Structures are given as C-alpha cells and as structure tokens.
Amino acid sequence: ELAGLKLLLTIVDKCRLHPNITTGQLLEDWRETEQASLMARLASWDIPLGSDEDSLHTVFFDAMDKVIDQCVTQQIEKLQAKSNTVGLSVEEKRELQLLLLNRPV
C-alpha cells in the first residue's frame, strides 16, 4: 500500500463532508494520534498556490491523478510478481489485464 494513502483518503473524505473545515480543526482531530506529527508537518508546508478556485482544483486533481497512477502501477507490479512466482487466479489475470490496458502513460 502506498505510504500515507489511508491518511490522505481520510483527510479528503473529512474535507468532503465538512467543506469549510480549517487546518486547525484538522490538526485537532489528529492531535493525540500517531499521525499528529505528520499532520503538523503537512500543515506547515508552504505550497505556492494560485488564489482562484480553478487553479486550486487543478492542483488538487493533478495530485490525486498522480496518487492514482502510483496505486495502479504498484498493483500491476504486485500482480506481475505474483504471476512470476505462484501464478494468478482467473480474477487476478483479468484485473492485471484491465490495469495494463488502462495503465498511466
């Protein structure tokens, strides 16, 4: 699994459910968890973004596309490695075929 993916998905889901949530509120939600220091580091990043909403959406969706591409690539590599060692089930072969057909360029 991609490092930090579960945390990213949780943050995205929380922001989707609470569109006006602030960085401070997010930090508070993770205050006494294993991810607290990571959340604090993420919150301190100075990411130069445009001020208009369209550019913010573009940056976000470009980043999410890269995450998806990495997940697809990782799953392809996992299935290929399994194929070379113990073989794949019919379902896994089908999944690998679909992933290869739709793999990121």
Image (tube, rainbow, N blue to C red):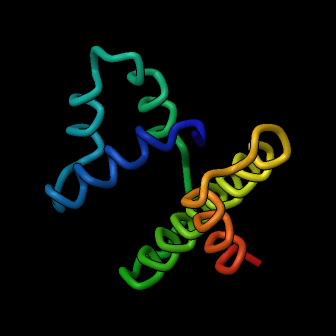
Q: Residue drawn 52% across and 38% down? A: 4
Residue lying at the far front in this picture: please name it.
Answer: 90
Q: Position of residue 103 (x, y in %)?
A: 69, 74
Residue 105 falls left or right of residue 68: right
Q: Position of residue 34 (x, y in %)?
A: 40, 16
Relative depth, front residue between 17 and 36: 17
Q: Is residue 34 left or right of residue 71?
A: left
Q: Nearer the viewer, residue 14 or 41?
A: 14
The residue under the point 47% across, 68% down is: 60
On screen, 57 above or below 29?
Answer: below
Task: Specify the quadrant of the image occupied by residue 24.
Answer: top left
**What residue is at 30 percent from the left and 44 percent from the top?**
23
Q: Is residue 29 above or below residue 21?
A: above
Quadrant of the snapshot with the C terminus: bottom right
* Above or below 98: residue 84: above
Q: Position of residue 19 (x, y in %)?
A: 18, 62
Give x and y (percent) for residue 38.
Answer: 48, 28
Screen quadrant of the N terminus? top right
